[in-house]
Image (cartoon, grey):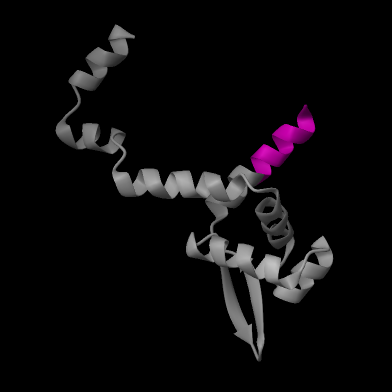
Amino acid sequence: MSELNDKNESMDPIDKNKLELDEETLFIVSQTFKALSDPTRIKILHLLSKKQHSVNEIAESLNMLQSTVSHQLRFLKNLRLVKYKREGTTMIYSCDDQHVMDVLKQMIDHARHH
């Protein structure tokens, strides 16, 4: 442990700053984990990882109310985990953060491995 401390002490200030977590980063990370802690949001993200879907398609595929799906999609969109495009009057949703999708896939693989 002291070897690690010695290395950290010899780092220039720029490298030390990279190790620190600012409040905005902490907030985004905690909100992202919050998003991934909800089974409904996990189902939605997993479905969207396969292909893009409308709210109605998501609701039908997951046997959920459209209002529930819309609420969860709004939460995910605010975190920039999903995005949408308009096709006429229909909103088509897709994943917007491959990093988070990779983490989700790894966690699903981990759960299935045990």
99 or 37, which lies in front? Answer: 37
Q: Residue at x 16, y 33 (%)?
A: 13
85 on left or right of 28: right
Q: Is residue 107 magenta?
A: yes
Q: Quadrant of residue 76?
A: bottom right
Q: Residue at x 66, y 76 (%)?
A: 92
The part of the chain drawn in magenta is 105-114
Relative to 108, residue 12 above or below = above
Judge left or right: residue 64 versus residue 100: right
Q: Can you say which quadrant of the picture contains the N terminus?
A: top left
In terms of secondary structure, what is the magenta stretch mainly?
Answer: helix
Depicted 74 relative to depicted 10: above or below: below
Q: Quadrant of residue 8?
A: top left
Q: How many marks?
A: 0
Q: x, y percentage for residue 9? A: 19, 19
Find residue 57 and report its horizontal and vertical position in percent: 78, 72
Q: Nearer the viewer, residue 83 or 11?
A: 83
Left or right: 72 with respect to 57? left
- Which of these two is toward me, 33 or 87? 33
Q: Residue at 16%, 30% (x, y): give it.
A: 12
Going by the picture, which residue comes out furthest to the bottom?
88
In the picture, the quarter occupied by the C terminus is top right
Decide whether residue 113 is among the magenta residues: yes
**In the rendering, at what x and y percent does residue 85 appear?**
59, 79
